[in-house]
Amino acid sequence: MPTQHIVRSFDDELQYLEAKIAEMGRHAGEMILRSVDCLVTNNTQLASDVIADDIFLDLAERDLDEKAITIIAKRQPMAVDLRAIIGTIKISSDLERVGDMGKNIAKRVAPIGQSRQPERFYQGLKTFADLVLSQLNEVLDAYATRSLDRIDAVRERDCEVDVLYTSLYREILALMIKEPKNITPCTHLLFCAKNLERVGDHITNIAETLHYIITGDIMPPERPKDDKTYKLSADDINLRQNEE
Amino acid sequence: MDIKMRGTDVKVFYGEKEALHGINLDIARNAVTALIGPSGCGKSTFLRCLNRMNDTIEGARVTGLITLDREDIYDPKIDVVELRARVGMVFQKPNPFPKSIYDNVAYGPRIHGLAKTKSDLDAIVEQSLRKAGLFDEVKDRLKELGTGLSGGQQQRLCIARAIAVSPEVILMDEPCSALDPIATARIEELIDDLRKNFTITIVTHSMQQAARVSQFTAMFHLGKLVEVGETQSIFTSPKEPRTQDYITGRFG
Amino acid sequence: MIQSLDNRRREIGLKKRYRAEKRFRFYGLAAISIGLFFLVVLVVNVVSQGYSVFQQTQLSLDVYLDKKIIDPNNELHAKPELLVTANYPLLVRNALAKKLDVDLTDRASLRDLNAFFSQSARVLIRDRVVANPNIIGTTQKFTILASANIDSAFKGQIDLSVPEQNRKVSNRALTWMKKLALEHSLYKSFNTGFFLHGASSRPEVAGIGVALIGSLYMMAIVLLLALPIGVATAIYLEEYAKKTLFADIIEVNINNLAAVPSIIFGLLGLAVFINFFGLPRSASLVGGLVLTLMTLPTIIIATRSSLRAVPPSIRDAALGLGASKTQVVFQHVLPLAAPGVFTGTIIGIAQALGETAPLILIGMVAFVANYPTSPVDPSTTLPAQIYMWANEPERAFVERTWGAIIVLLIFLAILNTAAVYLRRRFERHWS
């Protein structure tokens, strides 16, 4: 914001909220990164660390909620301040869920590790995770700089996320059909992919909330956030297989 | 929006100094319009133009067009006394006359000849006091001096006095600034009630009050109208940066 | 170390301040005491010199209405005017001589006898005889005023150590006086004549009656004229007139008029009312008009400041309800300004009551013996009467001068007290 509040402690309080969101965002991103790493390298020790770390985000979300409510009671914020505070509450909830997704992925490291697969197996997932993480960083950057352009970029790349998820989904299904003994690890992988896809959804939520904070307008609900995998049937898979 | 009063390019000069620079503002019928802005921004000046109270100030000159139901209120044919019976005013500091409560409320109807008999007048007084939410508190002491009431009661008495002449528009210049929160809340409740039958324009320093009480808000700054719109959008997402800076307390 | 230094400095400041306060309080008390002292001196002086006037020495005497003196030639039925011109003082002298056992052949004694009673006895007896001529030949009881010198002597105002030739009262007369006093024929009683009679060359019958009526007429005229004109002018200047240079000039002039020496108003009255309009000289009407002009600035200024003191919130409230300018002024502002207006008026009238200089020039400082029946009859006023009597050397006139001053001061005190009382009573609190 170009100018400061006449009462400086109000600025300090808003600053606290922003810093906390940035911290939560970093932490959530790290959780995703580490959990996928653990998956690929089959590091169960690190995985349990990641699971334990999730508590930080839970506490941070509660702290943010409390602080936000206090600011509303004390300051009766208007306009951009009001939007920023309500936005903070929503974004912290989204980031906490992102952390939960990371925790879920970490939980599946042990079961997947029991039937170890070649590197190539996890490559798709890693690529997907990288894409999602870059989205997360992008949206957190947009939050810090309040940049509308970056939000648009995030929205656009969200299509990529969906496309990549659908193809990953197909790949894993194909793997399951080809070698039925892979079904157990592949099912876990599917869930991990789904978790990452949902991280993508939360990132889009954050982008929309940020858009509302900056402009005061709610974004039009045109974005294609549904996952289209429900359209895939066994016949489709077979067809693709035969094509290959 | 059904328009009750409209100001077009309204300018006010105090001597050589231009205090209001070309204001264009519509006042909606049977709704509350709040005028907000920092001190000295011209909101009270504009308010006083609406019932020609600026006429009483030496050296004040008003240009532009102000209409009430599409009639120019500064037209020489218009009787300013009659205008002020149609557009009433409540002031910042409660100012009841040093007469009895009854006489305070009855004064307006008396001078405008609204009551033919004593019982008519009694009815008008009772009705006005009821509408102002004061009747039950004072019904057995109507003969007592109006100045003996508490601050909040005095202000409600002034509102009853203004209502008694059956105005179409009620102008309020910071009516709650001298009152405690409970009295303020009562007056806000009263305003909410009154807007069913009257058009109300209120000048207020409290943004929270403007947000609570009004349907439309106009923001003034340095004699200019910065922004006007529906209250909910002004206070959640105003379009002008100056408006935003003022209502979030960033001014300066 | 530094903290105690500050404490020390603070204490010194306090001591100095308290000392200054004590000094100031002392100055104030001293000033008040000096003022009170002079006030007490004034009151004591005035009262001690004038209180004696409220009693007059009277003689109660049986007078034989000798027909031989009243109507020697028995011509009464033909010449009724004889009753008016008869030598009544002679009857009194004879009665007094008889009472005191004085030999009627002793000329010196006769002189003293004649000088013992007031010549006003003539009028007293004449009036009773004219009213009822049948009492001629009978003996009637009369209450006659003693002469001024005897009155002064009886009140102890004459210095008896001075040798007889230099005194106004002879030793013989003094003896008579004591004798009659012992018999209770000579006594002091309340001097109603002081309040009822007009001016007279005989001090024992001189009174302030005419002056009181004259003052009353004048105050009534001032009230009837100055109050409405003054209040109306003030209302116009304060509420209706536009604030132009002309209005400012008028305001300055009115303020100056309040300070113009009063004798100039007298000259104005002489030139305009008497010479130009031809109004009668010495009339209380002219006096009233002159004093109206003098009191107008006071009333205008007092009314204007009372109007200004009415808070604008009341005006705004009335205007906001749709009251016209006139309604605001007369229904709201004026009632609230009324206490100030009354106070100003009463103070103005009290001032007018005590004016003498302008009245000199319009002829109200004149010898007026008869009551004025209307404001155009010649009259005088209380301060003018005091001025005239102050020029007379006789002891009885001295006493009367001070007595009139007492009456004037009492009136002024009453008026000012009324002003304060009215103001307190009608002061309304509009906040």
Image (cartoon, helix red, strand yellow):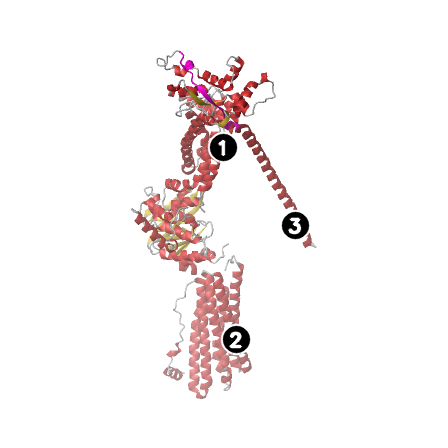
Residue range of the region highlighted in magenta in the rendering? C52-72
- What numbered label is drawn on residue A55? 2
Instruction: Specify the subunit that label 1 lies on.
Output: C
- What numbered label is drawn on residue C10? 3
* C56 in the magenta segment: yes
Q: From the viewer's perspective, is residue A231 above or below residue B248? A: below
Q: Nearer the viewer, residue C54 or C71?
A: C71
Numbered disc 3: secondary structure: helix
Q: CA distance from mark 1 to mark 2?
A: 98 Å
Q: B72 left or right of B42? A: left
Figure quadrant of the C terminus of chain A: bottom left
Callout 3 amino acid: Arg
> Residue shown at 48%/35% (left/top)?
C416
Indicate which label's residue lies in the foreground, 1 or 2.
Answer: 1
* Residue A142 % position (x, y): 48, 66
| Contact check, label 1 and label 3, Cβ < 8 Å | no
**Could you tell which of marks 1 and 3 lies nearer the N-terminus?**
3
Callout 1 amino acid: Ile
Instruction: Give the residue at mark 1.
Output: C410
Q: Nearer the viewer, residue A162 or A108?
A: A108
Q: Quadrant of residue A219?
A: bottom left
Instruction: Specify the subunit that label 2 lies on.
Output: A
| Contact check, label 3 and label 2, Cβ < 8 Å | no
Q: From the viewer's perspective, is residue C93 above or below residue A33? A: above
* A242 in the magenta segment: no
> Residue shown at 39%/76% (left/top)?
A228
Residues packed near mark 2 inside 10 Å, few (<14), some (14 to 19) or many (20 plus): some
* Residue B201 % position (x, y): 38, 52
